[in-house]
């Protein structure tokens, strides 16, 4: 019994999970100090446990850890952008969105693990299919990051409706009214986001198809 408890206490998955959970709650508390440490954070606990398991499977590779951090920030930090832009945001919304970003990264990494076991031709196809699917939430989040880089504001539904109803002349006038430095920052940040995310996916699912598991085919937990 004592050995089992000691093994649990030295298991990196446990401490990674605890750290992820605490970081998410801390960010939520910074936004809204009424957040409860025990209430409504099932998503954070699930994401933390999943992150610990996935990192163990991938042997804590630096590229994998970087991918999980980037995914969590790009997908899950949208409420933080809204808060920075001056909007009222509930702390639990921040926690839940960060958890979704981390869970998505974990699912993508598990999918990449499974395709590494496929035959070469099927692996090549699956690699690009998984990579394309993994980019979907990033592409959906990209307009929010672009607009924030451009105007330092959060892209709200009413703004989206206004932009949709804008005619060509008004759109050109709006473009000309923005400083060139803002446009350069917005475009460069968008290219950087897509490039970094795509690079990490290709790097993780790259040519090295050796088993990630001890013993060649079984996971060592």
Image: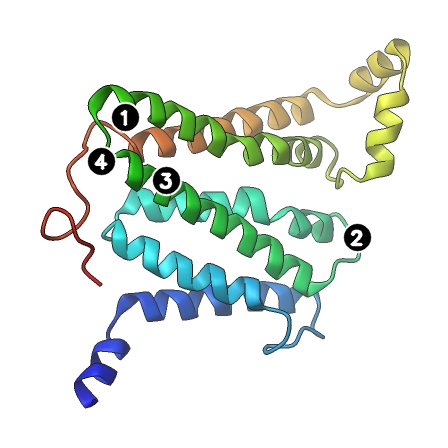
Using the numbered discs, state the Cα–Cα distance from disc 2 to disc 3 in whole angstroms: 36 Å
Which residue position is annotated with label 1? 123
Earlier along the polypeptide chain: callout 2 or callout 1?
Answer: 2
Secondary structure, mark 4, is: loop
Earlier along the polypeptide chain: callout 2 or callout 3?
Answer: 2
User: Viewer-nearest of labels 2 and 4?
Assistant: 4
Asked whether residue 60 appears in the rendered view, the answer is no
Asked whether residue 69 appears in the rendered view, the answer is yes
Using the numbered discs, state the Cα–Cα distance from disc 2 to disc 1 in whole angstroms: 45 Å
Q: Residues within 10 Å of mark 4 (few under 14, many from 20)?
A: some
User: Viewer-nearest of labels 2 and 1?
Assistant: 1
Which residue position is annotated with label 2? 87
Residue 98 in the image: state x and y as whole percent: 56, 54
Q: Which mark is residue 117?
A: 4
Using the numbered discs, state the Cα–Cα distance from disc 2 to disc 4 in whole angstroms: 46 Å
User: Viewer-nearest of labels 2 and 3?
Assistant: 3
Count of number-bearing discs: 4
Residue 103 in the image: state x and y as whole percent: 48, 51
- In contact (CB < 8 Å): disc 4 and disc 1: no
Using the numbered discs, state the Cα–Cα distance from disc 1 to disc 3 in whole angstroms: 11 Å
Residue 44 in the image: state x and y as whole percent: 53, 63
In the rendered image, which quarter contains the C terminus? Answer: bottom left
């Amino acid at each position: 019994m004592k050995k089992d408890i000691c093994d649990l206490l030295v298991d990196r998955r446990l401490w990674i999970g605890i750290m992820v959970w605490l970081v998410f709650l801390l960010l939520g508390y910074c936004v809204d100090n009424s957040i409860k440490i025990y209430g409504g954070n099932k998503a954070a606990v699930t994401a933390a446990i999943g992150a610990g398991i996935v990192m163990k499977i991938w042997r804590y590779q630096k590229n994998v850890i970087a991918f999980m951090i980037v995914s969590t920030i790009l997908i899950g930090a949208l409420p933080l952008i809204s808060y920075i832009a001056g909007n009222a945001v509930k702390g639990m919304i921040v926690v839940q969105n960060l958890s979704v970003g981390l869970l998505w990264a974990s699912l993508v990494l598990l999918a990449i693990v499974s395709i590494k076991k496929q035959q070469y031709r099927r692996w090549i196809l699956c690699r690009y299919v998984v990579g394309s699917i993994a980019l979907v939430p990033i592409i959906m989040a990209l307009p929010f990051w672009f607009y924030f880089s451009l105007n330092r504001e959060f892209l709200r539904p009413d703004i989206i409706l206004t932009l949709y109803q804008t005619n060509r002349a008004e759109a050109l006038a709006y473009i000309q009214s923005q400083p060139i430095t803002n446009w350069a920052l917005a475009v460069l940040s968008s290219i950087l986001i897509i490039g970094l995310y795509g690079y990490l996916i290709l790097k993780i699912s790259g040519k090295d198809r050796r088993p990630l598991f001890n013993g060649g085919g079984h996971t060592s937990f």
